[in-house]
Image (cartoon, helix red, strand yellow):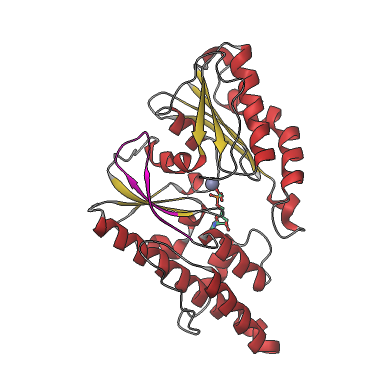
Amino acid sequence: MILGIETSCDETAAAVVTADGEIRSNVVSSQAELHARFGGVVPEVASRRHLELVTPVLTQALSEAGATLDDIEAVAVTQGPGLVGALLVGLSAAKALAWARRLPLIPVDHLHGHIASLYLRPDPLEPPFLCLLASGGHTLLLDVRGRDGYRVLGTSIDDAAGEAFDKGARLLGLGYPGGAALDRLAQEGDPQAFSFPVARVAELDFSFSGVKTALLYATRELGEDLENRRADLAASYQRALVRALVERACDAAALSRHETIAVVGGVAANSELRAALPQARFAPLALCTDNAAMIASAGRFGRRLPYPRYLDLDAYASRS
Ligand code: KG4
Ligand code: ZN
């Protein structure tokens, strides 16, 4: 069994996954409430909370799996991208455990982790496929030909899709992180009430900063009427974001000749996106937002660093 650890942003997570991709436990402790009053994740606050939570979360993941460290053959951990201080907490915990038990350590790329949420049982997906990864930190179109990696075809040149959902939610007074709340509010509104054009940028890239500004102006213009139109604004705004994601994903699939489109990351939980791509493979709801089962899953296909050749391993903040 592989022990997975994920601390790249504001979720402290640990999971136990078998070599053939069965989830034995998947514990996620979200810090969202802690950061809500700041309207976003405060990196230093996140790191400190990870420090407090990492040991109890690891203990719980082992106990829910009915396992002890004797049953673990390797430790997989997110190395980046993410908040460096937050990543270092998980990475240090992973090094300490692996070193103490003389186990190999597998550094995992967080984005590969999101893709690997599709490789878990009971219904694992087999490459090749075109993957849309839409989360709070990234919007990427990925060409996936094997389980050990991916190639980037397109990305957002400004805000990530999840960030656009969160910023829109904040403008509508829905709190942080507001993607799921906006999704719920949109179900009561008219998606054609407002027109929010999404900029089409070159090739297979995305841009979401303009549509957010359009929403800001719309809320200002409504003034006192805003309260009555919040659901319509949410529905129209969500429609614009989903359209942009769907169009680009279909373009990318056609260009790279993929028959299968897969969608992963926090925004893959969006009900309208799921409905707009009925033929696509979506990550299971529980595995859309950050978790450690996907990290352990990616670890199955990653490079194992033998004991003790990982003690100087460093975290990295960004993809490049
Ligand atoms: O993958 P994730 O947990 O974190 C990153 O790796 O960034 O994604 C979190 C993002 C947040 O922006 C959140 O608002 C968004 O996913 N999200 C949603 C929904 N559920 C979560 N966005 C739209 N609709 C949802 N139902
Ligand atoms: Zn993520």
Q: Is residue 72 shown above or below 25?
A: above
Magenta stretch: residue 141 in it? yes
Residue 257 in sight here: yes
Q: Is residue 272 shown above or below 106?
A: below
Q: Residue drawn at (48%, 67%), measured in percent from left and top? A: 207
Relative image position of residue 22 (x, y in whole percent): 42, 29
Residue 256 in the figure: left or right of residue 24: left
Residue 278 in sight here: no
Q: How many marks?
A: 0
Q: Residue drawn at (60%, 63%), measured in percent from left and top? A: 166
Magenta stretch: residue 66 in it? no
Which of the pair 206/300 is nearer the observer?
206
Relative image position of residue 25 (x, y in whole percent): 53, 30
The region drawn magenta spans 140-156
Which of the pair 113/55 is nearer the observer?
113
Q: Is residue 113 shown above or below 189?
A: above
Q: Residue drawn at (49%, 23%), measured in percent from left and top? A: 2
Quarter-of-image position of residue 5:
top right
Q: Is residue 86 shown above or below 101?
A: below
Quarter-of-image position of residue 228:
bottom right
Q: Residue drawn at (47%, 39%), measured in percent from left and top? A: 113
Which of the pair 271/256 is nearer the observer?
256
Relative image position of residue 29 (x, y in whole percent): 65, 40
Relative image position of residue 295 (x, y in whole percent): 50, 34
